[in-house]
């Protein structure tokens, strides 16, 4: 089995790891780097539970080979808080009960962060389209949407 | 599987020529799900995204050149591209979620050879050409000639699409793409319809009508094009467009739509797309 040595930046830290060429980036993050925030819901691009940010763009890590990460800058859900200070989205998801089992939550948080970074005051429709690649099987989408709206308000107010 | 990331077209051709089971990929949004569902693994995965020519969109001398591995989100975010080809841009933007958009490419959408590929009808409607590289050098062919059947292309084992060329449309010309899916996001087309028209005032002087998901490959509808040319897109013409589009269908029956449903919807979408394209060509509200 062929293996590739990969150098990249994850949540601000330079990392390197050895990955088999058929390994997905999702598996490498979870198994080589112990970053188990991103989840595998489907492995085929449908559910978004594996969402991460690669060079500023939202991606499904299950649809990337680990070897493709060479030279990239990656942000996972583990990197969105500021030290002990939760990201506003994390806080509003908690307060708004936007999760039950939590399997989908890391993906929603990362996708919502990309949205708010690009568009600080999205409409409800824009939020729904931006999160269309993320599925939740238990909470229902309304609490998730409300929590993103609340986070947008808080970020806008600088709190 | 072995991963290779060539940085030149020649290097990539060399890998393909040296190993018949090597496969190129761009976003892998079709490739990885297919491997996971049990399709044979390629021996070498040839990542095309590290080759400069494969990524990016530029206009020069009246022709747009779009790298075959360019993420579709790059195209929909490009205001000049979207102004020149509103229909091709909207078709490209319909592929999957934001996550998928940051990876999905025209090269993959075309060469995966699904009849339901959203960008392909709009590429045909704009007479796009594919620049193909292989051991024998490069050749340029109309995009129509690439797909030969579901999952089948005319590319040789050592060939891949380097880039697409699309001429900037003449004045008073615009395209539109409509698709029907059972949901509003994240599904595969039941029918897709791309129309491009050139208008001289109220009169249509040139037209392309292309349908997706209604036959083993994307199909042109010459009878609908003939009905549009010379018309003012009056009701009788639009009915003729719809009838010709329905007649061109040879669809499958599946859980997303029956043969009767796909056939009828093809007519409706062709007619609506023609109206939108004509309004856009005349600088109308829908542009
Ligand atoms: C969740 C999800 C939703 C989707 N929704 C849609 C949708 O709405 N509409 C739609 O049309 N598609 C959809 N798709 C399918 C897929 O995303 C598109 O077909 C996409 O454009 C494929 O591009 P890619 O770069 O990812 O292809 P890849 O997976 O990289 O490649 C696909 C195939 O094309 C070949 N190939 C790739 N590039 C080239 C090249 N330059 N030259 C020769 N061969 C090449 C590969 O060998 C492979 O066989 C969806 C997929 C997923 C996972
Ligand atoms: S695990 Fe990647 S999209 Fe579902
Ligand atoms: S909280 Fe369980 S899937 Fe969303």
Image: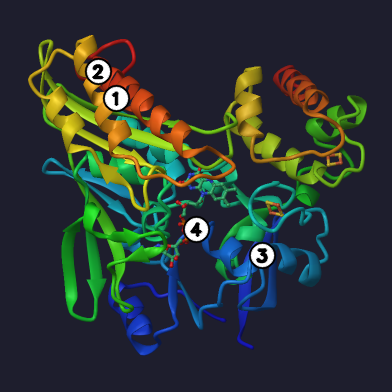
Count neighbours of disc 3 (C-alpha within 10 A) and say few if under 14, some if 14 to 19, many if 20 or more: many
Residue B27: numbered disc = 4
Labels 1 & 2 near each other (Cβ < 8 A): yes
On residue B242, which mark appears?
1
Q: Are marks 2 and 4 on the same chain?
A: yes
- Disc 2 is placed on an element classified as helix
Going by the image, does B89 lie left or right of B181? left
Circle 4 marks a residue in which chain? B
* Residue at disc 4, CB closer than 8 Å to ligand 1: yes
- N-terminal label among 4 and 1: 4
Mark number displayed over residue B238: 2
Q: Chain of mark 3?
A: A
Q: Could you tell whether B91 is left or right of A41 in the image?
A: left
Query: Closest to the observer: A123 or B130?
Result: B130
Image x and y of residue B67, in percent: 32, 55
Nearer the viewer's eye, disc 3 or disc 1?
1
Label 2 to label 3: alpha-carbon separation: 50 Å
The image shows residue A68, relative to residue A126, as above or below, that is below
> Percent from the top left, x then y, of residue B117?
42, 47
- What is the spatial separation of the Cα atoms under label 4 and label 1, in whole angstroms? 35 Å
Q: Residue at x 22, y 47 (%)?
A: B128
Q: Secondary structure at mark 4?
A: loop
Pick whichever of labels 2 and 4 is earlier in the sequence. 4
Residue at the disc numbered 3: A25
- Residue B275 x/y as whole percent: 28, 17
């Amino acid at each position: 089995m062929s293996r590739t040595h990969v150098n990249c930046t994850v949540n601000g830290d330079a990392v390197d790891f050895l990955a088999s060429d058929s390994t997905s980036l999702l598996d490498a993050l979870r198994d080589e780097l112990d970053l188990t925030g991103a989840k595998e819901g489907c492995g085929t691009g449908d559910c978004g539970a594996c969402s991460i940010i690669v060079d500023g763009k939202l991606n499904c890590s299950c649809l990337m080979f680990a070897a493709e990460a060479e030279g990239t800058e990656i942000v996972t859900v583990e990197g969105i808080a500021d030290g002990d200070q939760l990201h506003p989205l994390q806080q509003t998801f908690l307060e708004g009960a936007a999760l039950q089992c939590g399997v989908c939550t890391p993906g929603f948080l990362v996708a919502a962060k990309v949205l708010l970074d690009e568009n600080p005051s999205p409409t409800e429709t824009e939020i729904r389209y931006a999160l269309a690649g993320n599925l939740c099987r238990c909470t229902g989408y309304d609490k998730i949407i409300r929590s993103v709206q609340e986070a947008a308000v808080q970020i806008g107010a600088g709190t | 599987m072995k991963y290779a990331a060539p940085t030149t077209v020649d290097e990539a051709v060399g890998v393909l020529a040296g190993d018949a089971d090597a496969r190129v990929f761009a976003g892998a949004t079709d490739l990885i799900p297919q491997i996971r569902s049990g399709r044979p693994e390629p021996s070498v995965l040839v990542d095309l995204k590290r080759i400069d020519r494969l990524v990016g969109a530029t206009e020069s001398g009246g022709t747009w050149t779009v790298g075959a591995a360019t993420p579709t989100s790059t195209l929909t975010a490009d205001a000049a591209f979207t102004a020149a080809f509103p229909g091709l841009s909207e078709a490209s933007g319909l592929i999957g979620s934001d996550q998928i958009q940051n990876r999905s490419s025209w090269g993959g959408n075309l060469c995966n050879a699904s009849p339901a590929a959203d960008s392909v009808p709009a590429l045909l409607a704009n007479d796009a050409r594919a620049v193909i590289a292989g051991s024998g050098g490069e050749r340029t062919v109309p995009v129509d000639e690439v797909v030969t059947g579901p999952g089948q292309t005319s590319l040789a084992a050592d060939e891949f699409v380097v880039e697409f060329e699309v001429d900037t449309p003449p004045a008073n010309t615009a395209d539109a793409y409509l698709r029907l899916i059972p949901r509003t996001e994240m599904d595969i087309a039941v029918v897709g319809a791309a129309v491009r028209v050139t208008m001289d005032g109220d009169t249509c002087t040139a037209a392309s009508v292309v349908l997706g998901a209604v036959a083993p490959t994307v199909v042109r509808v010459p009878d609908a094009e003939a009905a549009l040319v010379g018309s003012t897109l009056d009701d009788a013409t639009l009915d003729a467009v719809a009838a010709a589009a329905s007649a061109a269908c040879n669809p499958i029956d599946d859980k997303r739509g029956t043969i009767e449903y796909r056939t009828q919807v093809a007519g409706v979408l062709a007619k609506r797309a023609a109206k939108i394209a004509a309004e856009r060509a005349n600088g109308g509200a829908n542009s």
